Image (cartoon, grey):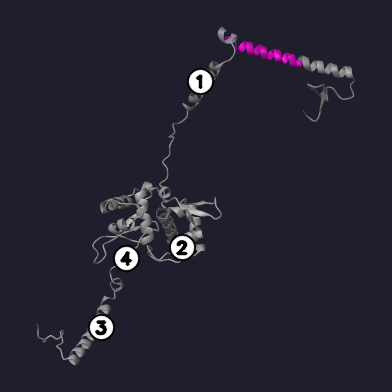
């Protein structure tokens, strides 16, 4: 209702310019009757137009009440108009199911890998105390056995690692008790089978290992049938396609004097190939082999002189002398 309108009765409003407030009651009623007549004429005109529009419709349509057939007809007409409109538009390629982006395997820090591996270990070895509290988790990360390398994490470092692992959906927190407890979601978060998750967890805790060492160390986690089954799962992790996140392990070069090649995980990023050469002396890797050989020769010469002096005091032959008699 506009600001210049006056309400007469309960159903009609007359413009103030037609029926100003100073008019008496009869004049106001006359104005209201005029509005009613105009309204009735408008309704009759609309009815006449509706009859004119429905004159060409079938008789049985005009006599019945609207039902589902009218809705179906209206829907068909809407579709027909839409198709007619788009038929004049240039053709466009529409992708109904766009290809999902390739998953990216998260890169973990050393602390995060240790925390995650500890949760995976305790879930299988001590299920009665799992999920773990923060204090128990720190003790598991810093234990002196079954860990390579040894670490000394505090609660703040473990909590920081847990926060990021939760953001990656690799760790879950349960707060039903007095203290918060944490459990891992590694298998679903990374998208690997149980056996592959066991091998990756063992590599995170104990570093690079051979297939035989993995089978022996993972005996409490999962009973692999033989070494070939371990190698089969490792090969699957190595040949993991890019659309699934790429490889998760690396087969290191054979170390000097080693019979088998070691495997390392890639959850913490690329691995230096030096890791596979742990049995090689540091001098070989640093180019200091001649100096080390000279030191060893000096030590051997000192030992030979000491043995010669002892043999002379005891009155026995020196076994290292070139002219010493053979037995």
What label sits on residue 299 in the rendered view?
3
- Above or below, comparing residue 74 to residue 174 in the picture: above
Q: CA distance from mark 1 to mark 3?
A: 101 Å
Q: Marks 4 and 2, Cα distance to the nearest angstrom?
A: 30 Å
Nearest to the eye among marks 4 and 2: give it.
2
Give how far apart the Cα atoms at labels 3 and 2 are.
44 Å
Assign the magenta stretch its main secondary structure. Answer: helix
Choose the circle earlier in sequence order: 4 or 2. 2
Q: Left or right? Give the position of 49 relative to 205.
A: right
Image quarter in which the N terminus is found: top right
Please report contact status of discs 1 and 3: CB closer than 8 Å, yes or no.
Answer: no
Looking at the rendered structure, the secondary structure element under dot 1 is helix
| Crowd rating for badge 3 (residues with CA inside 10 Å; few <14, some 14–19, many 20+) | few
Who comes first in sequence, dot 1 or dot 3? 1
Point 29% across, 57% down: residue: 211
Identify the residue under disc 4: 274
Distance from label 4 to label 3 (Cα)?
29 Å
Q: Please provide the residue range marked out in magenta.
A: 38-58
Tag 2 secondary structure:
helix
Q: Which mark is residue 139?
A: 2
N-terminal label among 4 and 1: 1
Q: Residues within 10 Å of mark 1 (few under 14, many from 20)?
A: few
Of label 3 and label 2, which has the lower sequence position? 2
Q: Nearer the viewer, residue 158 or 288?
A: 158
Labelled pair 3, 2 in contact (Cβ < 8 Å): no
Percent x, y of residue 31: 83, 18
Ranked by sequence position, the earlier of labels 4 and 3 is: 4
Q: Nearer the viewer, residue 56 or 108?
A: 108
Q: Position of residue 268 (x, y in %)?
A: 40, 58
Q: Nearer the viewer, mark 1 or mark 2?
A: 2
């Amino acid at each position: 209702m506009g600001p210049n309108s006056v309400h007469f009765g309960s159903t009609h409003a007359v413009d103030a310019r037609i029926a100003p407030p100073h008019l008496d009651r009869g004049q106001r009623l006359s104005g209201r009757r005029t509005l009613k007549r105009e309204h009735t004429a408008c309704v009759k005109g609309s009815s006449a137009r509706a009859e004119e529009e429905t004159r060409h419709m079938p008789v049985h349509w005009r006599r019945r009440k609207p039902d589902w057939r009218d809705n179906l007809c209206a829907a068909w007409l809407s579709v027909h108009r839409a198709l007619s409109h788009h038929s004049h538009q240039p053709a466009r390629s529409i992708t109904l199911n766009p290809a999902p982006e390739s998953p990216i395997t998260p890169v973990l820090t050393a602390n995060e890998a240790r925390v995650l591996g500890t949760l995976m270990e305790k879930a299988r070895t001590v299920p009665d105390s799992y999920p773990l509290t923060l204090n128990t988790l720190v003790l598991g990360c810093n234990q002196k056995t079954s860990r390579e390398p040894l670490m000394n994490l505090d609660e703040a470092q473990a909590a920081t690692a847990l926060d990021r692992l939760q953001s990656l959906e690799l760790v879950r927190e349960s707060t039903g008790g007095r203290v918060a407890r944490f459990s891992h979601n590694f298998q679903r978060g990374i998208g690997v089978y149980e056996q592959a998750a066991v091998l990756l967890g063992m590599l995170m805790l104990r570093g690079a290992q051979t297939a035989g060492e993995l089978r022996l160390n993972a005996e409490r986690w999962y009973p692999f049938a033989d070494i070939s089954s371990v190698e089969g799962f490792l090969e699957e992790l190595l040949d993991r396609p890019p659309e699934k996140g790429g490889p998760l392990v690396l087969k290191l070069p054979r170390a000097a004097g080693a019979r088998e090649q070691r495997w390392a995980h890639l959850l913490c990023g690329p691995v230096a190939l030096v890791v596979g050469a742990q049995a090689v002396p540091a001098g070989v890797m640093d180019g200091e082999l001649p100096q080390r050989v000279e030191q060893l020769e000096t030590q051997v010469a000192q030992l030979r002189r000491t043995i010669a002096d002892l043999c002379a005091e005891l009155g026995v032959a020196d076994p290292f002398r070139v002219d010493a008699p053979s037995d």
